[in-house]
Image (tube, helix red, strand yellow):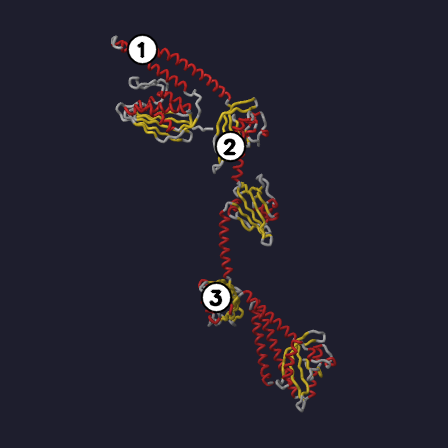
Amino acid sequence: MLNSTQKLIPTLIGLSVAIVALAAFLFSYLDHPFKLLSIAIVLLSVFIFYIALRLKKFNTYSNLSTESSSSSDEFATAFEYASIGMGLVSLEGRFIKVNKSLCDLLGYSSEEFTKLTFQEITHPDDLERDLGYVSKLVNDAIETYQIEKRYFTKKGDIIWINLSGSKVKNPDGSFKHFIAQIENITPRKDAFQKIEEQSQRIQNIIDGTNAGTWEWNVQTGETIFNQKWAELIGYTLEELSPISINTWMNFTHPDDLFISEQKLTECFEKQSEYYTCECRMQHKDGHWIWVLDRGKVMTWTEDGKPLMMFGTHTDITNLKEAQHELSKSKAFLDTVLNSVDVGIVVCDHTGRLTLFNQAATDMHGIPFNPLESKNWTSYYDLLKTDGITPLQLDEIPLFMALKDGQISNSELIIQHASGNKIFVNCTGNQILDQNNNLLGAVIAMTDITNLKLATKNAEDIAVKFKGIFDSTFQFIGFLSPEGTLLEANQTAVNFAGLHADDLIGKKFWDCYWWTISKETQETLKANIESAAKGEFIQYEVEVLGGMGPTTILFNLKPLFDASGEVIAIIPEGRPIQEIVDSRKALLQKNEELERFASVASHDLKEPLRMISSFLSLLEQNYKGKFDDKADTYIHFSVDAAKRMTNLINDLLNYAKIGSEDAPIELIKTNELINEILPLFNTDLEIQNRKIEIEKLPDIVGKTTPIKTLFQNLIGNAVKYQKPGSNTLIKVSGKENISNWEFCVEDNGIGIAPQHYEEIFQMFHRLHTKEEFAGTGMGLATCNKIVKQHGGEIWVKSEEGVGSKFFFTIKKQYLN
């Protein structure tokens, strides 16, 4: 056994030297994780070298023990002065003799040792194993044993030792004592502990980064991958065998191989110390993953060519996808920011400008410059709202938002590069992360130049409107839909003899003007409710003024929003007391004229009836008893008396038009005409004539005059026809915005254009009484009726073809 140990010693020494050389290479050329590995390898080589020396010494001491019978003096000398601890131990484990090295190692004196057993100073966790070897040694199961165990020093410290044990026999073969060789291996143990920690740390780094590793002999193409490298693309190393540099090339995207080759060339030509490339590799499932490929040439050939290269592969697919999404998000955000007409400006927490969108750049008219806050005022022309005074740094909204946290509705003027002044309204906030750490600030700038101009124009218009509003002769105001007086012009205030403060904010019906009577107030309240529903109200009413009661023509006009809802009501009134007084005088005159006409017609008709009666008796009793001339005279006299009677009746009817106290009411036009038509039945049957009545709109007016209007027009259409013709009369109508329009059409004899206006005058006739009977009052009466209803009447005609008589009736509303 000793011979085999002697043969192993040179081998171990050579191995340790080779390992040191490898460690030196790794330490010189690899990154940090591999330098840690190289340190670990150096420590391992030291340990192997140390083992070789210990084996050599063990072999020496074993020889000494074996030859103790012949060279006891030499053994004693070696025992005493050995560099390692040595002791003779009894079968029970008590130290018989120890050398100085062992005393120094454990801190006991020789005398103290003789009172100790090895069991007492052995760590409990190591004792059972040690005793097991002792038992085998005693029973000759083994010749020697060697273990690593822990001892307690006299101070109580724990040290690691390497124990080599053997036994010495007496000449008769009986047990004499044990020889213990004790070497302090605590430094080596500490070194191994550090090596293990470093190795674990390196492995943790590899596992933590989820990195695959590779080693590549650039000259031969020989390549080594770790298992993780294969797992990145869904394989095991066994599935990829045999492995070479072609393995990597076969799985890498062709487009990325070209880029990789360029970067490798830079490393091989020493233009770059490290090789870094992002490339795509095809996964076993068929999809592509992104890897970050990093490495470094660690050794070179004697002629300067790259030899060994080491590196890692890291899966960055998620990172690339995140970058892609981030890129899309940034593109989207940039598009949005540059599409809005609101200027966006951002700075970081130090006050350095980091973003100007297109709108912000356009507002200034100069390129964006990532300036620090101290340079803002020198580069950008920012003015106060007076357009003259430059803003100081602490007055700039972005700086205020950065320092104070928030800014809103802060106005300033930007002096554009062209010289134009742009009014902007700024709102801003600090930018904080999720832990409320300050990242920067942002403001949004809205161009309000046009708004400012519009506001100025609106203010100018308001001043002009106020002037017109207050100087008009009408009483004008504004009411809420609920009837509260919001505004009244100066004319209305002066009319009441009050101040605006006495009126504004009150319910309109409680204002001074309307307190003339309770009935007046209730009527106004009801009419305001109707106006709030969208109705236009107009009526005459007597109100109180500064000089007493006065009659006004009063309107309530609703104002609508875009959706058709009433948002306000405009009350408007104008004094019409003079008109009312004149109307009363006119009514009085009309009454007098009516009484005169009635009396005159009665006084004229009475003698006329007597003349007509006596002439009729004369004609009946004496016709044929005189000559023919006398009969003709009598006939003419009777006819003239009849015509005179008709004329007096027509004059009386004309005078009465408008004087009747008839109500304004809803007229169902088709029903009214149906009441008229029977008056013409005889003429229609005899002359083969036809009347067509369309669906006519209902109207508001005085029933009797409107009936007379249709009766006269239809009667004329029936009368003025060509003999023997097939007469067709049409009555039509439609509703316009402000009136109702009607047409009575015939196919009669027609009217020449030069007579279109004169036919509506009193007593104007176009035909003799022999051709067509009449007094010339029919169309004049129609004209008067239409005028009293706020309308117009006109004719379109062609001689020999027919006529169309048009008239309108102004729209009225029933209260």
Q: Position of residue 632 (x, y in %)?
A: 27, 11
The mark closer to the camera, 1 or 3, is: 1
Three-letter residue code for mark 1: Leu
Secondary structure at numbered mark 2: helix
- Looking at the image, residue 151 sits to the left or right of residue 512; the answer is right
Label 1: which secondary element = helix
Check the image and report above or below for 80 versus 222: below
Give the residue at mark 3: 233
Indicate which disc, 1 or 3, sits on the residue closer to the N terminus. 3
782 horizontally vs 352: left or right: left
| Residue 589 location (% of width, % of height) | 45, 16
The residue tagged with tag 3: helix, strand or loop?
Answer: loop
Whichever of labels 2 and 1 marks the residue nearer the N terminus, that label is: 2
Residue named by callout 1: 615
Mark 2: give few (<14), some (14-19) or many (20+) Cα within 10 Å.
some
**Residue type pointed to by label 2:** Glu
Labels 1 and 3 touching (C-beta < 8 A): no
Of residue 210 and residue 613, the one placed in the foreground of this image is 613
Q: CA distance from mark 2 to mark 3?
A: 82 Å
Q: Which callout, 2 or 3, points to the residue nearer the camera? A: 2
Residue where numbered disc 2 is placed: 529
Instruction: Measure how far apart labels 2 and 1 are at the Cα level.
Output: 68 Å
Q: Amino acid at mark 3?
A: Ile
